[in-house]
Amino acid sequence: MNPLVKAQNLSYKINDKKLFQGISFELLKGKALHIQGENGSGKTTLLRMVCGLTKPSKGNLIIKTDKEVCFIGHKNAIKQYLNIEDNLALMNLNNHQDLQKYLSIFNLEKSLDINIANLSFGQQKKISLLRLFLNSSDLIILDEPCVGLDTNSQEILVDFLKKELANGKGIIYSSHILLDFDADSLGI
Amino acid sequence: MEVIKFEFLKLLKKSRGWLGPILVFVLIMIAYPLTVEVSDIELSQSFFSILWIAALLVTMLATEDIFLEDFNDGVLEQYAILQKSLSFIIGSKVFVYWLVIGVPISIIGSIFCIGTTNQSALGYQILPILLVSTYIFMNVFSFGNALSLTKGSVLGTLVTLPLLLPLLIILGKVVIAINFDLNYLGFLFLLLGILSIIIIIIPMIISYIIRAHLE
Amino acid sequence: MFDIEFNSLAEALLMQSQNGQNHGIYVWSVILIVTLCISISFIFYKYKIKEISKKIK
Amino acid sequence: MFQVNRAYPYIFYLSLITYLFSIFWGLFVTPEDFVQGNSYRIIYLHVPASFISQSLYLAMAIASAVYLIWKVKLSVYLVRSIAPIGAVTTFIALTSGSIWGIPTWGTWWVWDARIVSTLILFIMYLGLISLHDSFNNNEKADKFLSILVLVGSVNIPIIKMSVEWWSTLHQPASITLSEKPAIDLVMLYPLFGSIIGFTGLIACLVILSSKLQIIKREKNKSWVKDYV
């Protein structure tokens, strides 16, 4: 079986200072990879590397998927001055079949015309997670997805990720809050 | 097309983003007659230099956070991992900005031109020139603001304004050409030629710069 | 070909032209500016290199 | 770099001697100009500076193209180290030009094509420096610097052409620099000498400045520590 992501000997430098080096891993379909490390060890950089945003200073990174990568980073990628409906339109999710289901799970279906700026941090995070819940990609990359989420939503997230793994998708994530599902771990 | 639609939605909902520059333009157009003695000759003599400078300043203000906002809230990194070409997205972004801000400015500018010089033919002739030149301004300032993305637009302006000086010279020549009934169409085609080069190259350069910023 | 144009130092400083104007002040101020700029840049770079070398040591 | 270091004193003293000798020749030996009087002697200081200020930009453009295509780090260090020296030489060209203008044109500033394009060049040099210095991530700064230099290098001939086009209509042609009185050979030799000498001196400055850049940027490398 072909791995979704194959990394060999990745290293990254900022201003000639090594952030990390010699990182190799493989991600098969239906598997998850938990990237662990201290603050500033380069978890975010590694995840962005897999997305193709950052280029490794050395090493090989092969990603085998025809579809776009689903990436949830620190930044929510939602517009503060627009309401939820418009934001969903921008994310191209407003006609998705499962949209109503997740809106009602997160109690957001009645506040579609509220500006994002009036929502709490956690609610904003939930909207940005809709990008994950309604994704159509093979590879999911999550950078601290649980920040600001209540335990209830964390459980929803974990259930969803388990379902995605069963569907044969690959997940790479980093999280300081332990997510309760099977994952290989990679320390950097 | 979807990209253009979304960019429209984003820009139109943010009224300070598009209405602000247009109003500033109108204010400059109203303000400059106050600084000269009100005699028609002097007004129409200085009108065009004020017009070009105002168009320059306002396009500069308008493109100030063309990429900054998307960069800060993370939309830009989502764009960058899409399979669509980033330079196409950037090109359509600049196009939308021009459509929403540049076109009204050009129309208002030519109305003021008719009002100041009392020659309606001049207004019609200046309108296409304004349309093309604001588009060029928008492109070049977007380049500058992409360079100085997180460092404020002063740096971007400092860096790109020298690049625009040849264009200002051409615009000055255009006015002379119109006044003396010379080769007006030639100038228009010259500007269109410059635009057609810029419109392709600048988005490519900007997308390279933005990718470097996201790294 | 190698005759010196001026007879004395004072004449060279003044550099009176045929039209009666003294051009010395212009010529000498330009010389001053050029020497200042060049020598200051030399000193600046030498100093900076020394400074950074000390730091690395 | 070590070869350059060894050659440096030779270049420095040779060009210094050439420069001083040519300046001396130009200032005291060459005959007075018939039209401009003694003030024409500024030419021996002004022309080398303005020649160098433009060729330095060309050098920067080549170096940044090399950086963007082959990713040679050394060439972007060169770009960064040339920029301040380019600013200094354009400054010299501008000030010497405007001082020269007082006796010849009767005014220290004329909206002349060459002057304006030199002034723009000066601003561009400063803009390049401030752009590079405002980024903490060196690689990012290098990329942006070389892009801007390349875009500018496309634009500089355009600026020159357009500015000349602009000033020929507005300005009576009698006071453009381009219409120099035909230079006599006696005056030309020291001019060549001063250009060569000044180029050598500026080359020395570029060597020093790039040395500084290399040490600054590679200070964690062991060979730099050995060298220092």
Image (cartoon, coloured by chain):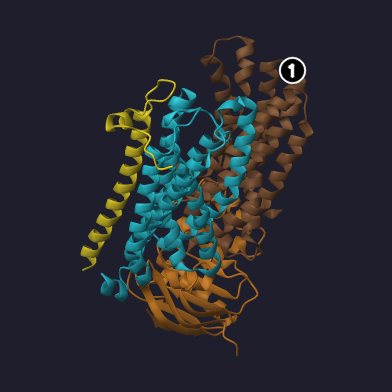
Chain colours: A orange, B brown, C yellow, D cyan
Q: Is residue A135 left or right of residue D73?
A: right
Between residues A116 and B126, which one lies in front from this camera angle?
B126
Q: In the orientation shown, which residue stands out farthest toward the bottom?
A: A1
Q: Residue at position x 62%, y 25% from top?
A: D170
One can see residue B12 in this view = no
Q: Is residue B154 above or below residue A17?
A: above
For mark 1, what is the residue?
B119
Residue A183 to residue B173: above or below: below
Q: Residues within 10 Å of mark 1 (few under 14, many from 20)?
A: few
Identity of the residue drawn at 46% across and 56% down: A123
Q: Nearer the viewer, residue B47 or C10?
A: C10
- Residue B134 on image: x %, y %: 64, 37
Residue D87 visible within the image: yes
**Residue B163 pos. (x, y %):** 56, 43
Host chain of mark 1:
B
- The residue drawn where x is 45% and y is 38% is D43
The quarter of the picture where residue B125 lies is top right
